[in-house]
Each structure stands twice: as structure tokens, then as C-alpha cells.
Image (spheres, rainbow, N blue to C red):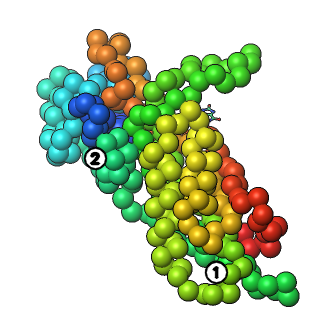
Amino acid sequence: MGIVLGANQYGKAETRVVRVVRDGPRHDLRDLNVSTCLAGDLAATHLTGDNANILPTDSQKNTVYAFAKRHGVDQIEDFALLLARHFVTSQPAITRARVDIEEYAWQRLGPHSFQRAGGEVRTASVTVDGDGTEVVSGLTGLVLLNSTDSEFAGFVQDPYTTLPPTKDRILATAVDAHWRHGDDRAADGTGWADSYAAVRAALLAGFVETYSRSLQQTLYAMGERVLREVAGIIEVRLSLPNKHHLLVDLAPFGLDNPGEVFVATDRPYGLIEGTVRRDDAPAADGAR
Ligand SMILES: O=c1[nH]c(=O)c2[nH]c(=O)[nH]c2[nH]1
């Protein structure tokens, strides 16, 4: 019985690259998930372990980042063409390159503030018992990003701290917010839609308009804004994942990176949680 190597290919799947274009104070943002896949004369690495024809998947990933900086990102078809052509023309052993790109849409909220389109869920939890009625409204999956006006510095330095302080970073989160209505509103039973729209607007304004020194500070600002602006809300509970965007080091490719090319990491992530409430709010009943 003969055994032979069949079809094969390899590449780097799901390189998440966020390209910020800083053209003055108004920024633009492109958010991509790029997968590269190369095929060609790859028999040796499978049969003998000779890697002479193998462009590391790590280099493929770096090419995505470097091209995002060097060429920018406009239409994803063009960016995919650029990458695929690069791999087949620069690598003698590679005869086929496939590049798949997903683009995640962001809606503009301000000069450097954006909201991820889609994925948002509205929630409601009602508790009725002998003591009364409690209504907790909420939303999850509201993904927000500020491409500047965020810093994180002045934190504890213990023997395990390696994080460099930063005066300019991307701040991104998926808002999970639940707010408790006062008794009057629950008894009244009207105006939920207006209340929801007003809370959502206040959360957005708190995120967009706060110069952030920590996500904790932004959390408080968002909750405070809801309580100040929306009548009938007595408590806001927020759970904010810190969706880290790390600056890619492009120096090995002779490129600078003044806050333009980032890797969006999905885990681990910081999770910042807190409650902001009116000081006269009665204790929660426990709907959520
Ligand atoms: O806004 C932040 N708060 C933190 O507590 C923290 N910790 C960390 O590593 N990065 C950040 N960012």
C-alpha cells in the first residue's frame, strides 16, 4: 500500500487588525478579521520537516499589520487582493494564496468615538412579591470605542507589573448595563420606551464625552450621567469588559506606528464592574 500526501494548505487564521486613520481630530476606523491561506510546493515540510519553503504564519500575520500601515485599508476586496498577490509573487514556492476578510462596521458617534453596529440586546427583569414590584431594565452587547482621549497611568507597580503606562490608547468595551426604576415608575407602568432611549443616550454621552484615565472612571461617569439625566432611575449597574487593543510593534519592518495599527485581543480581558446609585435608593429586591 502506498501512502501519499494529498491536498494541503496553511496560513494564519483570524488576524484581527484595527486601522485608525488620524487625519486631524476626526479619526476614521476600519476593523478587520483577516485570514491568509497559502498552497504550493509544501511537500517537504510534511514529508521530511524541511521548512525551506515555509513562510511562517507569524510572518503572514505581520504582513497584514504592516500592509495596513503602509497601504491603509479602503475596500476589503482591494486589501485582500494586495495581500494575496504579495504572497504569490514574493514566495517562489507558493502558487495559491487565499485571503478572507471580514469587516466589522462601526457607526460614528463623534470625531473619535464609534459604536459597533449590531449585536445589542434590550433586557427587562421584573420582580413582584409581597413587598412590591421591582423593574430592572437593561442592555447588553452595546460595543463602544474611543480611539483617543483615554490613558492609563499612575497604577501600582509590583514585582509582576510589566504594563507600560500610556497617555493615549484605544478604549473599547461591550456595555452590559442594568438600571433599576423607582417605585413610581414601576407603578405607573408607562414610558418604558422613552426611558430606555434616554438611558441609552446618557450611557453613550458618558462614554463619548469623558476624557478617561481608567475604565473605572468612565464607568462612574456613565452611571452618573444616567442618574442625572433620566428621571425615575435610582440605580445603574455596569459591567464593562476592557476590550484591549494593543499597538503593534512595526519597528522590525522599518515602520513607525503612532497610534495607527492595533491588534484587538479577545482574551484575557479586564472586567470592570460597578454600581452607581442615588444615595436614597432603597435596597435592591434582587431581580438581577
Ligand atoms: O482602565 C483600566 N483599568 C484597569 O484597572 C486596568 N488594568 C489594566 O491592566 N489595564 C487597565 N485599564
Residue type, mark 2 in image: Ile
Taking depth in this image into account, of 215 and 283 the one nearest to the observer is: 283
Residue at 70% in and 18% down: 157
Q: Position of residue 120 (x, y in %)?
A: 46, 65
Mark 1–mark 2 distance (CA, rounded to whole Å): 47 Å
Whether residue 7 is visible here, answered yes or no, is: no
Please give the name of the residue rendered at 80% of the width and 73% of the height, measured from the top-left corner.
Answer: 285
Report which residue position mark 1 lands on. Answer: 185
Q: Quadrant of the C terminus?
A: bottom right
Residue 238 spot, x, y in % from top left:
63, 55
SS at badge 1: helix
Compared to 280, does 151 lie above or below? above
Measured as percent of width and height from the top left, residue 276 is found at 68, 55
- Nearest to the observer: residue 283 or residue 256: 283
Residue neighbourhood size for the residue with mark 1, other residues' Cα within 10 Å, grouped as few (<14), some (14–19), many (≥20): some
CB within 8 Å, label 1 to label 2: no
Residue 259 in the figure: left or right of residue 162: left
In the displayed structure image, the side of residue 48 where residue 23 appears, left or right: left
**Residue type at numbered disc 1:** Arg
Give residue 271's quadrant in the image.
top right
Q: Is residue 284 left or right of residue 189?
A: right
Q: Which mark is residue 171?
A: none
Q: On the rendered image, what quadrant is the N terminus found in?
A: top left
Give the residue drawn at x 29%, y 16%.
Answer: 255
Q: Is residue 67 above or below residue 141?
A: above
Q: Which residue is mark 2?
A: 101
